[in-house]
Amino acid sequence: MDNQPSLVIACGALAKEITRLIDVNHWTGLRVQCIPAKIHNYPDQIPNAVRTLIHQARPRYHNIFIAFADCGTGGLLDAVIKEENVERLPGAHCYEFYAGSDAFAAMQDEELGTFYLTDFLARHFERLILKELGILKHPELRHMYFSNYKKLVYLAQTDNPELVKRAQDAASTLDLEYEFRRTDYGDLEQGLKRFNESIVQWQN
């Protein structure tokens, strides 16, 4: 068991970022299994989906880390985390763990009516926001959904001109002020780093 790889059960919205971090940091002992990102449309399903993957993984993996924030489960995911004796990423959502809790709280204090994008959401804005919310077919819904928002903040993990353009276009589409903030990988990277280090210590 000591030489077995360890598992990260992740939100599909983090798959690209986690894979990159594993490659760049040479965390060769980590494997990733993702739950489709669309489950965020049904946050009540996240806890059972995570629990199911934990139970499926336990015969093979001794060490398991959950790459989810609370993600709208209202503490139900934390109940699973406690029962299954695993750890998860900090914070209420990916915006918080990318930006850092203090920085995100400051942004919220500055302007509560802020809509956030990450690299993933900038890349898939049309499908996940415009299409899933019905705005493509019914443009009048934009005002219904976003009338209380003032600005769009793109929390960027990478320097990607194409994604910057997509985020700017998204702000224009939603008629919001645009702001760019480079966060890198924030507590996602730190959480995975701590998990990997704990595995090394456990194996030794």
Image (cartoon, rainbow, N blue to C red):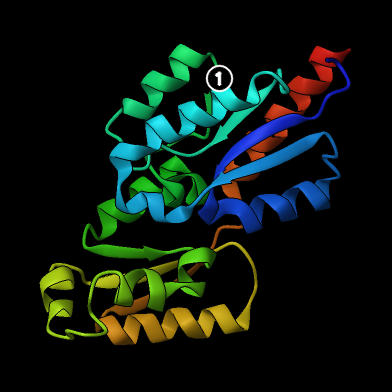
Residue for point 12% across, 84% down: 140
Would you place residue 39 above or below residue 45 in this image?
below
Which residue is disc 1 drawn over?
Answer: 86
Relative to 143, residue 181 above or below: above
Q: Based on the displayed image, in which of its 4 quarters is residue 178 positioned? A: bottom left
Note whether 112 is above or below 198 in the view shown.
below
Task: Point out residue 141 in the picture as x, y percentages from the top left corner.
Answer: 14, 78
Whether residue 179 is visible to the viewer of this picture, yes or no, is no
Could you say which quadrant of the image residue 38 lies in? bottom left
Left or right: 144 with respect to 29? left
Question: Of residues 60 and 23, which is closer to you in this image?
Answer: 60
Helix or strand or loop: what does disc 1 sit on?
Answer: loop
Number of marks in picture: 1
Please tell me which residue is depicted at 48% across the width and 82% down the height of the picture.
Answer: 166
Q: Give residue 176's quadrant in the image.
A: bottom left
74 relative to 111, above or below: above
Quarter of the image where the N terminus is located: top right
- Answer with left or right where residue 98 lies relative to residue 59: left
Q: Measuring 76% from the left and 36% from the top, which residue is drawn there?
A: 30
* Residue 7, x across and y down, in percent: 69, 32
Q: Answer left or right for 176 relative to 197.
A: left
Q: Is residue 181 left or right of residue 40?
A: right
Residue 199 image point, x, y percent:
77, 22
The residue positioned 59% from the left and 62% from the top of the image is: 157
Residue closer to the observer: 131 or 109 = 131
Q: Identity of the amino acid at label 1?
A: Val
Circle 1 packing at 10 Å, graded few (<14), some (14-19), many (20+), is some
Q: Quadrant of the C terminus?
A: top right
